[in-house]
Amino acid sequence: MFEGESVRLRSLELSDVPLIMKHWNNINLRKELGPVVPHSSNEREMWVRQTWKEREQRTAFVFAIETRKDRYFLGHCALKNVRWINRSAIVSIAIYNKSDRGKGYGTDALKVLLRVGFDFLNLHRIALNVFHTNKQALHVYEKIGFKKVGELRETDFVDGKYVNDVIMDMLEEDYRQLYHTKLAKNCLRG
């Protein structure tokens, strides 16, 4: 289990399925994550089981996000498409309930996930894709230190129109400069 300032990342459990289903089929969340069609509890249960297999095979590491204070379930985040020769992965995150967004949970979870990727898994590059229409997510990713490296035009058909897919990444060197320098300064103050 990995902890940040306000969140904890842990393995998904079958007992999380009812918590996942509480918001999973919300149309706005479905539009962000795709595909838009609803999912059943059985499908989500199979997905949780699949995350365990992927972790065992070391192709993806998917975590439940919960608050540290009261273990309130917020959503999930992942390092997926892990390519060990290239030391790269794709990051994804979803805070399910709209009322839990804008409170810093996603930012904290991503910082913890970057620490897992760079400090524990020895990755060199972590990338992500986000729709150009998701301004809140773009702001968070830039604030954390991801850099825009490209944009694929009209990749997805969402809510009656095509949207672009923004590609962002962070290299190990960027991470170390941003986060280890801050840690070192904090240690010197202590």
Image (cartoon, helix red, strand yellow):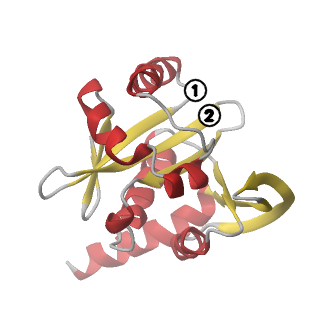
Q: Name the residue at 58% across, 55% down.
A: 32
Q: SS for tag 1?
A: loop
Any mark on residue 82, and which? 2
x, y (%) of residue 111? Answer: 43, 60
Position of 22 with respect to 156 (left or right) is left
Q: Which residue is nearer to you in this view: 49 or 109?
A: 49
In this view, the residue farthest toward the right is 153
Q: SS for tag 2?
A: strand
Q: Name the residue at 29% across, 25% down.
A: 14
- Residue type at the position of mark 2: Val
Q: Which residue is nearer to you in this view: 96 or 65?
A: 96
Mark 2 Cα shell of 10 Å, populated few (<14), some (14-19), many (≥20)? many
Q: Name the residue at 35% across, 71% down.
A: 104
x, y (%) of residue 176? Answer: 52, 63
Picture quarter with the N terminus: top left
Q: Which residue is mark 1?
A: 59
